[in-house]
Each structure stands twice: as C-alpha cells, then as structure tokens.
Image (cartoon, grey):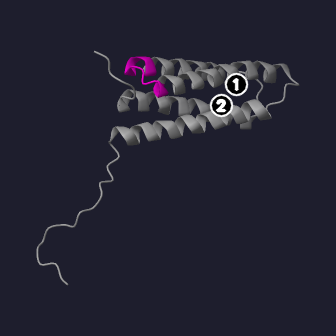
Amino acid sequence: MTRNDSRPMDVPSTSTSSPTSATTALAKVVADLDLLVRALLTSLPSSKPWQRRLRVHLTEPDRLLQVLRMTVAMGRSSGEVEQAAAELLKALRLANVYVNGGRADMGTKHAIQLAFSLGQQICVAVADGGVGVVQE
C-alpha cells in the first residue's frame, strides 16, 4: 500500500514552549539544586568555623526551596512565584559571596557557584515561563 498524496504524516508535536514543558524544566532545575544543597549540607563537616558558618548559609536556601515548591504546587500567582525565586537567589548569592571571600576549598567553592548558577536559571525560568496562576 503506497501513499499518493504529498501531505506529511501526523507527527506528535515536540514543541518545548508549552507551559507544561516550562514547568517540567523548572522542576528539574529545582530538583538538581535541592540535591546539591542537601549534598553540601550532608557532606560538609562542622569542624572549622567557616564550615559551620557555611552550613548556616545553606540552611536558608534549603528552606526557601521548600517555599518555592509549595508556592508553585499551590498554584499561587506568578508574582508570588517570582518573589520566592528571588528570595532563593538572594540566599544563594549570600552563600556564594561568603564562600568566595573565605577559606573554603575549591570543590566547595565550585559547588556553591553551581548552586548559584542553578538559582539564576530558576529565576530566568520563572520570569520567562510564567509559572504560577495569573490573578486579575
């Protein structure tokens, strides 16, 4: 059996601009950041003062990740989601500044820089993707 017309066959759309894919991408970045922050909190010893202080700096992003997840899960407005993401980025920025000015080893510095980069990606994804419910 042959096909005589020149119409393309139906192919499922693989567009990445749908709101679902934006939310999925955001969820992946949030999950990656969560894993990184928890790994740092778990593996970072508390024997030196800078390590204890860094642990304090990392507990705030850990808490704010939960706030961001709940804000998205509860279907809050995009403004509230953007605010939660901005607060998370601020906490990650503080940890990044602390580590870069301190005695942390290079592995820890790179991990915190990666966490900050993931935080920036979250803010961009929230701003571009319009995650959240728009309330008029």
Q: Is residue 76 magenta?
A: yes
Identity of the residue drawn at 32% across and 17% down: 135
In the drawing, does residue 88 fall left or right of residue 100?
left
Q: Which residues are magenta?
A: 72-81
| Figure quadrant of residue 131 | top left
Q: Look at the image and tell me in which quarter the N terminus lies.
A: bottom left
Q: Which residue is mark 2?
A: 112
Which residue corresponds to the image point at 14% horizontal and 67% vertical from the top-left? 7
Near mark 2 (Cα within 10 A), the count class, few <14, some 14-19 or many ≥20, is: many
- Check if residue 1 falls in the magenta segment: no
Q: Is residue 49 left or right of residue 41?
A: right
The residue under label 1 is 99
SS label for mark 2: helix
| First of labels 1, 2 by sequence position | 1
Amino acid type indicated by mark 2: Ile
Q: Are marks 1 and 2 in contact (CB under 8 Å)?
A: yes
- Above or below, 30 against 133 in this view is below
Q: Position of residue 55 (x, y in %)?
A: 75, 23
Of marks 1 and 2, the one in the foreground: 2
Q: Nearer the viewer, residue 134 or 97?
A: 134
Amino acid type at circle 1 is Val
